[in-house]
Image (cartoon, rainbow, N blue to C red):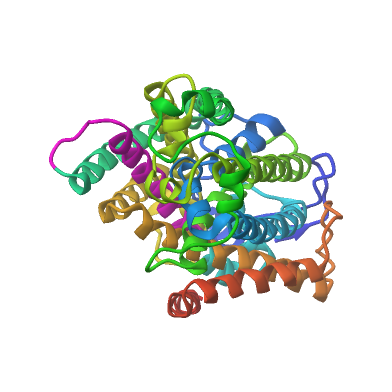
Amino acid sequence: MAHPEDENGGEGWEYEPNYPAKAAAAEEHIQPPLSLPSPSAPTGQSTLNGVFIPCTQSIIGIVLYSRFGWVTGQAGIAGALLILVTCTVVSFLTALSMCAIATNGKIPAGGSYYMIARSLGPAFGGSVGVLYFLGLVSSAAVYLVGAVETLLTNTSYGIVSTTFDIRLLGWLGVFLLWILNFVGMKYVTKTSLGITVILGLTVLSMYVGFFTAGVRSEDLPRGITGLSWSHMKENLGEEYSAGNGFDTVTAIFFPAVTGIMAGCDRAGFLSTPSRSIPRGTLSAIGITTVLYFSFFLLFGAVADREALKSELGMSALISWPTMDGITVGIIIATFGAALQCASSAPQVLSAMAQDDILPLRYFKYDVNASLFATSVLIMFFVTIGHFDSIAPAVTMFFLLFYGCVNVACCVLSVLNNPSWRPLWPYYHWTTALTGSILCFTIMVVISWWSALLAFIFAAGLY
């Protein structure tokens, strides 16, 4: 149900979610479904705390720390930058579409799901919402597996075997995520601020390490000799190992540009969502893109090809002043990215349950049940136990979700529905269409059969 009352300082049309269910509950004197956010959640968050920090934390993750050198070694500097530009264009165009949809009305908690459901209907929104939920769950698993992999690669720690250790420590990480989210969103926010500081310190230590690698080359593994033009020329072109190609490298890299919906997922906690979401999201995309661009150049200039391909822990090895301290920082920063995903996913699940489209009725009345189900699914993905096996799943889920967001914006713009009046003016149906075509094309390039299965799965949900 929509009405033109504008009592929220210019937020535009306000949508009333699940109006028939609430009306029926009132007639039967039954308490309507629980609303999100919970009473303990903080409200009135700023652009910095509510959007920019969550988005930046979700975007910068384990791919930077453990796979950037490998991506540079496989695709070369030129190929790595091409992958970066392609994936960034996808995230940027999707962000433009998201900002238009998000500023078209008041978006409650579970914002990314409600954006689609209230724009193109709950049936379409429910099918796309499941994809986004699975994307968040698999992303949290990728971050946890990557954090444990970093620990095992950079230290002599071990229990039984690498695969067993990744699963066991990953399960412990899932339990810690559940505890932090169970005690309340306000504690997640406080934790995020501290993790963001650690994230900044790890990035700074990597920059210092790159520029001092030349004087520390004797203490570094063979092949890491310091910044030089000869390395940059040698690593300019591609040199894929057997079984790898542009498609596989792109699939593993793409999770590094996801996380742009983290601010929209917290729309119910923001003071002014219509201003905070566009500013915070686009700022996060811009800053992380500049960081990624510089790191690809530095990785390509600091080591030879063999070292780039083999040293998965190069980010910690090359950092200054100590590898052990930076390893701890990388693990904490990566855990923070997992925390952002694990805190958003239950809200999306509860939001879908409130629309009664999918058989999720149990999660409508108990937010903690959504959190528990999310944790179980994260544990399932962690059980796979291998970073390179989970990352492509994250890529497929998010590409399909981003494509649907762009389709929604394109359709609403072309139809020119009277209720379509977003406060965000910097979008066009052609940019949305381009974004959707790019998403679906990349899916097919990465794996046509996986893309076909994803399309069938989404159609089946619809």
Say if the magenta span includes residue 157.
Answer: yes
At x 60%, y 55%, the residue is: 236
Asked if 306 appears above or below 250 in the picture, the reply is above
At x 51%, y 36%, the residue is: 38
Q: Quadrant of residue 169?
A: top left
Query: Residue 59's x, y, as percent?
Result: 57, 44
Q: Nearer the viewer, residue 353 or 390?
A: 390
Query: Residue 58's x, y, as percent?
Result: 54, 42
Q: Nearer the viewer, residue 299 or 404?
A: 299
Residue most extreme to the front: 230
Q: Nearer the viewer, residue 114 or 87?
A: 87
**Residue 367 can be seen, yes or no:** yes
Number of marks present in the image shown: 0
Relative placement, left or right, of 336 versus 212 is left
At x 65%, y 41%, the residue is: 294
Asked if 432 appears above or below 353 in the picture, the reply is below
Query: Residue 268's x, y, as percent?
Result: 63, 41
**Residue 28 can be seen, yes or no:** no
Stretch of the chain drawn in magenta = 131-160
The kind of secondary structure the magenta stretch mainly shows is: helix
Q: Quadrant of the N terminus?
A: bottom right
Asked if 200 appears above or below 89 in the picture, the reply is above
Query: Residue 328's x, y, as percent?
Result: 39, 26
Say if the magenta span includes residue 241.
Answer: no
Q: Quadrant of residue 297?
A: top right
Q: Nearer the viewer, residue 399 or 246?
A: 246
At x 53%, y 52%, the residue is: 72
Residue most extreme to the top: 321
Asked if 322 appears above or below 423 in the picture, the reply is above
Relative placement, left or right, of 440 versus 364 is right
